[in-house]
Amino acid sequence: MKKTAEIRCNGNLTGELITNGFVYEKNARTYICYGEEDVSGDAETQTIFKLYPQKAILTRSGEIKSRIIFEQGAQTRAEIETPFGEISIEVYTSKLDIEINEIQVRVNIEYKIIFGEGSEEDNKIELVACIN
């Protein structure tokens, strides 16, 4: 059953976001779903976090599409589709903490984006879904 939730997300790439969304379970996995406006304000990006005990998958669909897998201590490959073409990156997850209880879901991720030319960028995502 989908439960409404207030979503608070803070990250290097996204800044601070407070919005409404949903939390639900399916096939023993927890999902957090919410929408966010793109930079121009013209379109909405649908964001879904699929949570496993030791892994999180972030999927975004809209003008920019991406699917990033976060596993602590692992480096994964991701493709980001933009209106200007596809970008390939590697993502190294140094920290992944997931806490789930009846009143909230908390996800903290620290990761490094490794671009094709060898440059790197440290990032973090702190997400809390307070279930209504």
Image (cartoon, grey):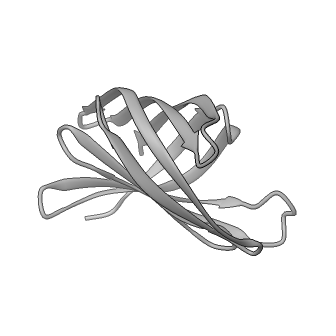
Q: Residue at x 21, y 46 (%)?
A: 52
Q: Residue furthest front?
A: 117
**Residue 132 seen in the current view:** yes
Q: From this view, report whether residue 104 is shown above or below residue 41.
A: above
Residue situated in front as seen by the camera: 10 or 122: 122
Position of the C terminus by quadrant:
top left
Give the residue furthest to the right: 40
Vertical placement of 80 versus 70: above or below?
Answer: below
Is 60 or 129 nearer to us in this picture?
60
Q: What residue is drawn where x is 48% and y is 35%? A: 127
- Locate residue 108, reporting x and y percent: 42, 28
Q: Is residue 63 above or below residue 67?
A: below
Give the number of marks: 0
Q: Position of residue 51 (x, y in %)?
A: 28, 48
Residue 36, x across and y down, in percent: 66, 58
Query: How far across and how far down the image is residue 20, in percent?
Result: 56, 53
* Residue that extends furthest to the left in the rendered view of this protein: 28
Instruction: Say which of 36 and 4 sits in front.
Output: 36
Q: Quadrant of the N terminus?
A: bottom left
Left or right of 54 in this view: 36:
right
Residue 69 in view here:
no
**Relative to 82, 54 lies left or right:** left
Residue 130 occupies quadrant: top left
Residue at point 84% right, 71% down? 42
Residue beneath the point at 12% across and 56% down: 28
